Amino acid sequence: MFLAGDLPPAPRLAIVGSRAAHRRFATACEALVKAAHGLGWSVVSGGALGIDAAVHRAAVAARVPQLAVLPCGPDRCYPPHHRGLFAEVLSQSSCGSGILFAHPAGTKTVRAMFASRNRIVVDLCEAVIVVEAALRSGSLVTASLARQKKRKLAAIPGTDGCGKLLQGGAHGLPPVSAGDKALTQAVQSWLTGQPRPRQQVLWPVHLQQVRELFDPPKPLEVETLDDPLQYVGELLEAEMLGLVVEVGPGRYVLTGG
């Protein structure tokens, strides 16, 4: 391995996610980075397209110590069109930022290198957040490694891969629709181990019938309802409002009180 710049100080939080990221999830990375920095944590990601790039850009903008772990040697920038972004990361080496190349110079980048890069990311961090993920993705590999290494693991609901992680016991953060303040508070509570105060969520009158389906508070399986089609529209509206989140196909949970 070859380190350019500095290794950011511990503790470190890895923030990872889909290469084909949706804008709302990429935008949320700014709140996650600032939440970590507010507690004195550095951030780490894999330098890839999508969520990784959003994390690195947010850290550059806020001058947060960060590390980009790349699946290549120092003579091969990957992905190539992130050269400018990586140069910005290195320009802040004085505040503790750097780039770790996972392989020696002259090594050709192949698929197997991505798995080794993910393992390095987990090894260097105390906690991992998966922002967005498909059911088959490198982000889920990173999450699996985090579990093996007994790292703190959290996921943001809203995609199938993250829903799978939440069903498997990952800590659930608020959906991005809850806003930056809610995300920041939730991340900081999780990292410090302090329970987040439960907030009273106001449901619109016309959605009260849907709210009653979750009493007593429990996951809702749509297929168990007598007439699932009757509630599809209302559940979608409730999800858009950040009141519920789909953690698996047809399986919803409340996001608040």
Image (tube, rainbow, N blue to C red):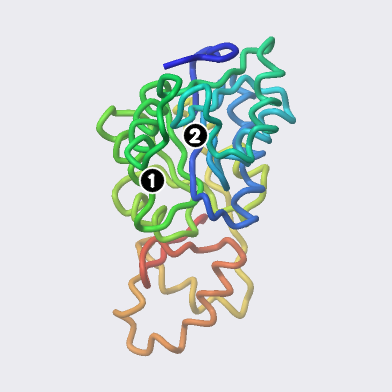
Image quadrant occupied by the N terminus: top left
Q: Which residue occupies 62% across, 48% down?
A: 26
The local secondary structure at tag 2 comes to loop
- Across and down, in percent, residue 114 comes to 38, 38
Residue that protrudes farthest toward the left in the picture: 148
Please name whichever residue, 207 or 147, is drawn nearer the observer in this view of the structure. Answer: 147
Q: Quadrant of residue 121?
A: top left
Residue 41 vs 239, above or below: the answer is above
Q: Which mark is residue 138?
A: 1
Q: Which residue occupies 44% across, 53% down?
A: 133
- Across and down, in percent, residue 38 comes to 64, 24
Q: Is residue 80 left or right of residue 137?
A: right
Q: Which mark is residue 46?
A: 2
Q: Residues within 10 Å of mark 1 (few under 14, many from 20)?
A: some
- Across and down, in percent, residue 160 comes to 41, 61
Residue type beneath disc 2? Gly
Instruction: For the residues labelled 2 and 1, say whether their Cβ atoms are less than 8 Å apart.
Output: yes
Q: Which residue occupies 48% across, 76% down?
A: 210
